[in-house]
Amino acid sequence: MSGKLPTGRFVIVQNMQDATAIIVRHLANPGSPIDRIYPMDMFRLEATRVMGLEGKMTDSDLHILLTHLARDEAAIAYNDHAVKFRGPEEALPNLTDQDVTIASLKALVADLHEQIAILSAHTASLSEKAKQAVVNKHRTAALAALKSKKLNEDVLRRRAESLSQLEEVYSKIEQAADQVAMVRVLEGSTSVLRNLYKDTGGLEKVEDVVGKLREETSKVDEVGGFLQAVGQDNALVHDDALDEELEGMLQDAEAQEKKQKALHTHKQHAELETIGKVPSEEPTEKGDVTPISTEEVTKTLKRVSLNEGQLVTNRSSSLHTAEAATLPNTEAAG
């Protein structure tokens, strides 16, 4: 091998793939089947526009694009007159004589639009020319311009009428194509419904299944009701046990509280015993109490001291009795 490339024309595959992706995204209309059909000249113009190219696409570039789209991408079917993109419901595109006729109709409508635009511009130019001739007082030139304008307006009117008829025909074809697609969908839907009905096994099988379902459902409901009743019984027993336990706890707490009160009372009595005996009965008469002077009471209280949280007295219990009896007399004297 010499290592030299053979003489010929080459294409960068990545560039070709990018270009075809843009064309398919913009021109492969997923809507009406009529919109996916293009006359060859219209396809060339639209492909040039969507790719943002300046000028007209060459015949060589057009041939490469068409070959890649049809052979490698299976996105179109084409001949010398028309290009048809593959629809969403199609495995492979197929170009029929009917498609070629529709493409020819679209090409004729587009050509009439172009002719009408040119004739309209020419009519406006002739009208301006006649006005200028009148201003310049050129009668003959003005008449010639008006005559040409009249003829041009007649041609324009006929072209507009033809365009209106063709657009009406195109609208009917588009409507019929949509109806065909709808009929196909309805036909497929009918087949699906028929097969699904067969899968159900008929009305008798459905009634049998529904009856068995109701029977099993009633059994489940019965079991559920029984289990619920058992759960309620268990819940009642459990609540009674809780009530008994709570009552016992309350009784224990009440007994403990009484015990604490008794201990507290006993403790208070013991503390008082450390100071002196508590009189069992209050004196009924003033003569039962031996009066003690205030000075002696004061001296006795000074001898009382605090020892480890408890009061200890160094005086005998008889002094305490005398003190308790004397304090009211002292207050009365004061």
Image (cartoon, rainbow, N blue to C red):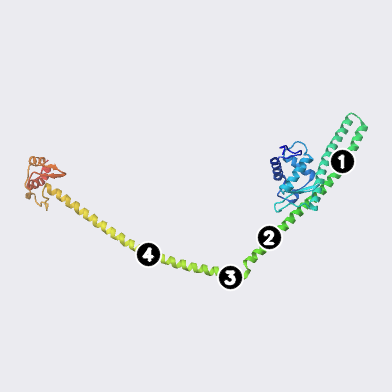
Which quadrant does the C terminus fall into?
top left
Which residue lies under the disc numbered 4? 236
| 273 lies left or right of 148 | left
Residue 228 lies, with reference to residue 109, above or below; the image says below
Q: Secondary structure at mark 1?
A: helix
Of 217 and 332, the residue lying toward us: 217
Q: Residue at x 82, y 43 (%)?
A: 111
Mark 4 or 3, which is nearer the eye? 3
Q: What is the quadrant of residue 195 in the picture?
A: bottom right
Residue 278 lies, with reference to residue 334, above or below; the image says below
Disc sitting over residue 141 in the figure: none
Of 58 and 273, the residue lying toward us: 58
- Separation (CA) of disc 1 from disc 4: 103 Å
Farthest top residue in view: 136
Which residue lies under the disc numbered 2? 189
Q: Give the percent coordinates (x, y) of residue 175.
A: 76, 53
- Separation (CA) of disc 2 from disc 1: 53 Å
Q: Residue at x 25, y 57 (%)?
A: 254
**Amino acid type at mark 1:** Glu
Q: Give the percent coordinates (x, y) of residue 294.
A: 9, 41
Q: Secondary structure at mark 2?
A: helix
Which residue lies under the disc numbered 1? 153
